[in-house]
Image (cartoon, coloured by chain):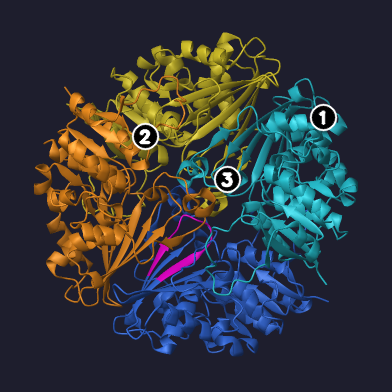
Chain colours: A cyan, B yellow, C orange, D blue
């Protein structure tokens, strides 16, 4: 019999992606938990099947025996719901930023809001399996990483661990994201006519994802420059990362460094030295593709890291975490 | 009576843009010079008017009294045609890279081809009016700048002149361009299905436009890191430029630095400190929009420079140069 | 001295297009009338010039001596403001649907709302110059046509007048529009992620533009089938129009029929028989391009009509009407 | 042990889609057959796995024991290769138009070329499972349907069978396709800058897919008007189909008609009466979505049929046919 798992926030882009991927998961069955009134009108298809829907309540979690509940909700909603879900015996995978930072103060600094469940921060495990796998399996509350930090940390942390980066010179991360990263709520900034044939930076100087990179990558605050920019496309994040690596002889050394670090990792793929990934290669996959060049002219290395922001940057990674929580093969439904 | 000017290569995107803009020029009339066989079939409109067409030959230039000829042709064709055009008495504005670099050796290094008219390199004037205005007016041969270098040099040279950049730390220029920058010749790389919903770097490590930036900006080779990337849109270049500016107190100082340098310049527009330009603001205009922020967290400045690659990055700037050559108001047909 | 004209609703797409085109009009100066609070934040450019701004009031119209006021506002706002504007001595060009239909009943049927100024309907002149030129010049209140009806009526009315259509078989008009036709107000339906890589019909069975086509084209209700569909692009309307024309020998006869009807018309362009227009050819122009084929296999004719929905379908046509009102050359600022 | 199947033409869009879908097929393993020289350069990923590759020859088919070979090749190549493949004991599913029409004369009329294997036309079975399922299972050579005809025939044939269409008035099919339908070979018509922000008709009056609709739908030549148009998007075909259905009382009757015809069909989905499908709903699926309205105003019915041109319109349907040939559940790898 299949294990049942719940999804709150299934109408957003990350929530819908959870539904889409879980459809092909052989061991779990998704249940949609309706938390807010559904204003989207009735079904347009005659015989729409899809996952069963239940009104959300802690009792439902318990009576339905939901092993895991995904929160694809804004951070304030995740903070509100997480305690009761845990009390009801579910393990929680939160896709918002509510439980990613280690302290309530840091949350307030970057999210400009109070953290209403500071006591859960100590318990929450950051759900980047490539670096936190051991702790994830035994946890009750997984803070699923942000999309930008997933691509950034997978590219940067091995460099920092290996000590190849000139830390004084720092790292520049020029990041570009598709529009689905901004969520499904209508706004002028994500309107078709404003985005198409356009490109621009946003959240300049204070993007909420910066502290996640600092927390995981091992970089100090002044070592990490980050710019988020909006691409006129639906899905994908590509980050172009610049740094000085004075001890390196060539791109091959960089690629081999990654290769050693990620040996056996199912979701990190490396490009040949001198080749860089594109977004098409990762679309609708849970892969993070990484490529590197070393520019002899300038002495700078360039690493490019690409993911699908809704898969490895959200729903796919959440399911990877669910697989770890429930003891399934980590790649189930994701390859 | 209107002055007549010729266009070679009017079927490419830059050439077509020359035609489009010159239609509204009150003092000149464009003549299309047919150099190669026209394989594009007859006109589809019943009463297409458009500029008159003439078969190209040096005699035609002379007999028609064309004061200026635009070469919207590949560099090898520009090198082939320029001498005869100059002999025929025309002044030449070349939109290719043929005459932009100062030495034939440098050309060979970056274009991987011999320069067949090295003696013309000494005479050619680099057509970036904001920095070379005085020399342009009296020249016979204008090398119209590349699209990436136009955006880069307008942003970087004032910083270098003012001495605010930490040269040892260098400058990172993360550049993004629309597809029209690659020209009209069909190729898999610019096919719709390969570009839409995609983003990727190209010409990694050896983009031909790098030496133009070195030549004009005042930077040394190892100080300038450059990555060209392809946006899924038609027109526009946006460059995100990172550097350390240890002596600066804030973005306002940067913006004021630009404001002093570009006082009176009709085609450079500045954004408020902390605001950055987007591509939509420059589309189909001859403006270069520049904005700056200073990240107190990291001590790095970020300058964004945006142009329309077919206008200020090609045809518009070429007409700006033509206005200078012919003694017209510099902004004629361009505002 | 330039004549001054006012624009209400300059932040919407049609209003912004009015501003853009009027910038190049040699005889008029635009004034932006601020009717609602401006919530869009301060200017991002340092020295934004643009047209002067005034708070809207009928007194301002009078004291500023505005000859014409453009209403680029929703129909309910246009109905509210038009009487006072007319009283203040301005001539009004309304870009909404408020004054296009001849009766208040018809308005209520299609707009699902009461008409609050029924007495103005008799006075309003439908602003399609190719068919109503004589009446426009002398009018006080011009109802600028809808975007779909402009393309449809220019294609269909000459056919009906010439009697070539098999009326019993009727006309099918399969219409496709870019997203800017839906206006600038954010909504899920016009969000980037919902529109890109998508295509769909909307306002099925009751599109508000249908009665305008019936009123102008000469077709009876049951003779005209219309489907509006949303293209994943910014601007442009293309309508594919199917009908039986039993008496016609070939596409040439159709094209010649249009040619006779539109002889001397500056903004209707015809394609060669067998060639059909595309959206690119009309983008950012005030042209309506028309092409025709006759399918010997099926006995059906196909006519394609293409415009830029923001220009000939809105702001450009409104300025064409203003030129008529003020006695200027009809093409001023529009070629 | 998995059955092995071969793919010729795996670099084209349909071929790549075959590879993508077969990756998830539990019973077959794909083998890529290299027929032409590979000019695409080496792999960019370090450890690209993907299906095994073999040089194509009839002997390889035999020695490898390939049960089925997919031809994702142009029709002239399919005609050239099919006989040897059949001789080698493989069953062939051809995705080109080579074997879809019943007579060599008809092929010549529409494809403007001689048919080099006319004797195979009698044997070939048209691979539209919803109408030809019984014959497909036992065949050696399946002519996989064209993309436009798949959407058209699934919508139209039930109407013709049920006798609800006013045949004298005929059917208008206004069809729109994404760019991948034109294949991967670079051409100006499918270049990004020509397609983006554009929309246009193509293959006017003689689209090769018309005879497939005539052959399958039951319509006579003069009853079927068809226009193919290019959407600025990657994948998807949507057809808007107009006809008179004098005996019908409402859209519900139409939807019920389809419901009866397609009861039990796994890949045809119906929309509620009055709702019409969009492209997003079928992207990357093997579904054909159908919706219907009946316009009481005009007495015309409108049916919209939507598929993914690379899935139900090509590779997905080919795998559906393979499942039938090999006796697997028809939906294997396709839901």
Q: Is residue B184 magenta?
A: no
Quarter assignment of residue C226: bottom left
**Label placed on residue A179:** 3
The quadrant the C terminus of chain C occupies is: top left
Side of C211 relative to D144 (left or right): left
Camera-side mark, 3 or 1: 3
Span colored in magenta: D227-240
Residues packed near mark 3 inside 10 Å, few (<14), some (14 to 19) or many (20 plus): many
The residue sitting at 74% across, 54% down in the picture is A70
Question: Is residue A39 visible in the rendered structure shown here?
Answer: yes
Q: What label does residue B234 carry, if any?
A: none
Q: Nearer the viewer, residue D101 or C171?
A: C171
Disc number for residue A248: 1
Chain where mark 2 sits: C
Q: Label 1 near label 2: C-beta < 8 Å?
A: no
From the viewer's side, name the closer residue of D147 and A52: A52
Nearer the camera: disc 2 or disc 1: 2
Q: Looking at the picture, tell me which residue is in the foreground, A18 or C232.
A: A18
- With B65 as the anchor, is A163 left or right in this view? right
Circle 2 sits on which residue?
C36
**B312 w.r.t. B132: above or below:** below
x and y percentages locating residue B16 in the rendered image: 36, 40
Mark 2 and mark 1 on one chain: no
Image quarter of residue B226: top right
Q: Residue C253, image x and y in percent?
A: 17, 66
């Amino acid at each position: 019999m299949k294990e049942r798992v719940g999804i709150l926030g299934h109408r957003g882009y990350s929530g819908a992606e959870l539904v889409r991927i879980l459809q092909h998961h052989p061991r779990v069955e998704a249940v949609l938990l309706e938390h807010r009134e559904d204003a989207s009108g009735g079904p347009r298809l005659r015989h729409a099947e899809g996952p069963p829907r239940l009104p959300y309540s802690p009792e439902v979690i318990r009576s339905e025996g939901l092993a895991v509940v995904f929160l694809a909700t804004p951070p304030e909603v995740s903070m509100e719901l997480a305690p009761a879900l845990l009390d009801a015996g579910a393990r929680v995978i939160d896709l918002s930023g509510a439980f990613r930072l280690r302290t309530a103060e840091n949350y307030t600094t970057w999210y400009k809001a109070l953290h209403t469940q500071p006591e859960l921060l100590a318990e929450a495990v950051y759900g980047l399996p490539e670096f936190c796998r051991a702790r994830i399996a035994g946890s009750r509350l997984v803070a699923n990483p942000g999309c930008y930090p997933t691509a950034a940390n997978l590219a940067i942390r091995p460099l920092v661990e290996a000590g190849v980066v000139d830390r004084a010179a720092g790292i520049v991360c020029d990041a570009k994201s598709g529009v689905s990263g901004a969520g499904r709520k209508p706004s002028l900034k994500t309107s078709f006519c404003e985005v198409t044939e356009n490109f621009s930076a946003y959240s300049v100087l204070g993007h909420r994802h910066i502290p996640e990179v600092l927390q995981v990558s091992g970089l100090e605050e002044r070592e990490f420059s980050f710019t988020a920019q909006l691409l006129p496309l639906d899905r994908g994040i590509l980050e172009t990362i610049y740094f000085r690596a004075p001890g390196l002889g060539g791109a091959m050394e960089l690629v081999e460094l990654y290769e050693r670090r990620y040996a056996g990792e199912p979701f990190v793929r490396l490009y040949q030295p001198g080749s860089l990934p594109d977004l098409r290669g990762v679309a609708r996959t849970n892969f993070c593709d990484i490529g590197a060049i070393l520019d002899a002219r300038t002495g700078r290395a360039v690493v490019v890291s690409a993911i699908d922001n809704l898969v490895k940057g959200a729903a796919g990674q959440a399911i990877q975490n669910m697989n770890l929580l429930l003891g399934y093969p980590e790649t189930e439904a994701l390859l």
